Amino acid sequence: MDASRETTAERLLDWYDVNARTLPWRAPPGTPAPDPYRVWLSEVMLQQTTVAAVKEYFAKFIRLWPSVADLAAAPDEEVMAAWAGLGYYARARNLLACAREVAARGGTFPETEAELRTLPGLGPYTAAAVAAIAFGARAVVVDANVERVVSRLFAIEIPLPASRPEIRERTEEITPDARAGDFAQAMMDLGSGICTVREPKCLLCPLSDTCAARASGDPARLPVKAPKKAKPTRTGRAFWIETRIAGEDHVWLVRRAGKGMLGGMRALPDDGWAARQDGHGEDLAQGPWEPAGRVSHVFSHFALDLRLAIHAGASPPQDLGEGEWWPLEKLDEAGLPTLFAKAARLALAHTGEDA
């Protein structure tokens, strides 16, 4: 039996009605659509991040900012701190820009895919997902799970990413006019729990008898992926400087530039490393400086080998530039991104203080 819109959609939706995942941003099958704000927030968070990692952050954002108007009014530094650890920090900056644009337009999200695309940070996938899930519009929603399901269903042999136009075309063919949002979520659930990367559970799949990859005998072979390019390794230095203020230990933190790597985040000062260049290797200020080890971190396009230096002088250096003395006992509230949180733990371990 060949896959068609009618058979695929009907079978998949019947399966979803029974097997849909319970997620905090979803409405169960057959119930009114969820709040567009919750759909949009979850979809932005889920980009390049797992459901398990997102749940805690989603709950925190909804608690702190229950509506898009609340988020739009939030200070940048509070939102960036709340996002810390979730990675891909440009998403947080886009999140704020989008929330403020929605608030400026009256506080409601547009309902069509085309109008959603006019909002900051909403690419084709997010706009389609919000249109389908929150507003019931027929939109073609293609994430990594859908790519895998469709590649196998139609045995698409062209390697990713070159196969994406055909994957989208095939997804368009099987997307129903009604319940497009449930269909999109059903495809995501199927890819997440049944049509998995390794050892797909074909015997449990509602589409198994129409799947061309299963008929070939080796569904896990698809989708074919082009070889990954080796990531360059950059080197840099970070600096840990402490002082005592009113009897309490403080560490010097800076605010990174609004654009670029980890833009807008609090961080330890460093020597100017970036995605396309090593750090300049010079000391931040007059020493003495004590080496405290290295932190390795992998970004989307490069790996970083970051050496940590601790200021060992009796008093902190002068002329540190712009920054702030942050109380050590509240360091977990600073919202340090993962890289600098690792460096902070290394510094605290080196100095014998509590992490």
Image (cartoon, rainbow, N blue to C red):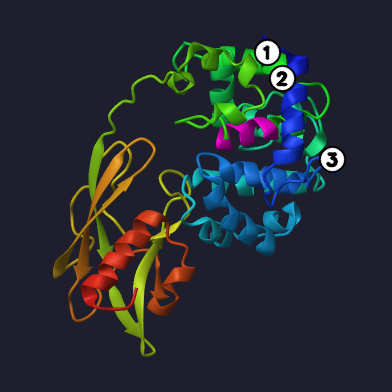
SS type, badge 3:
loop
Circle 2 sits on which residue? 8
Q: Where is residue 246 in the image (x, y as percent from the top left)?
A: 39, 89
- Report the amino acid beneath label 1: Ala
* Callout 3 crowding tier (Cα within 10 Å): few <14, some 14–19, many ≥20: few
- Of mark 3 and mark 1, the one earlier in the sequence is 1
Q: Distance between the residues labelled 3 and 2?
A: 19 Å
Q: Give the range drawn in magenta.
A: 185-193
Circle 3 sits on which residue? 30
The disc label shown at residue 192, or none:
none
Q: Position of residue 70 (x, y in %)?
A: 72, 59
Name the image quarter holding the C terminus: bottom left
| Residue 110 visible to an observer of this rendering | no
Q: Which image quadrant is residue 77 in?
A: bottom right
Q: Does the residue at mark 3 contact the one at mark 2 (Cβ under 8 Å)? A: no
Q: Where is residue 301 in the image (x, y as percent from the top left)?
A: 36, 35
Question: What residue appears at the point 67 percent right and 44 percent down from the top-left corner?
Answer: 21
Question: What residue appears at the point 70 percent right and 13 percent down from the top-left corner?
Answer: 173
Whether 195 is among the magenta residues is no
- Of mark 3 and mark 2, the one earlier in the sequence is 2
The disc label shown at residue 3, or none:
1
Question: What residue appears at the point 58 percent right and 58 percent down from the top-left corner?
Answer: 56
- Report the amino acid beneath label 3: Gly
Q: Does the residue at mark 1 contact the one at mark 2 (Cβ under 8 Å)? A: yes
Whether 191 is among the magenta residues is yes
Q: Which of 86 and 252 is in front in this view?
A: 86
SS type, badge 1:
loop
SS type, badge 2:
helix
* Callout 1 crowding tier (Cα within 10 Å): few <14, some 14–19, many ≥20: some
Q: Position of residue 334 (x, y in %)?
A: 46, 67
301 left or right, relative to 4: left
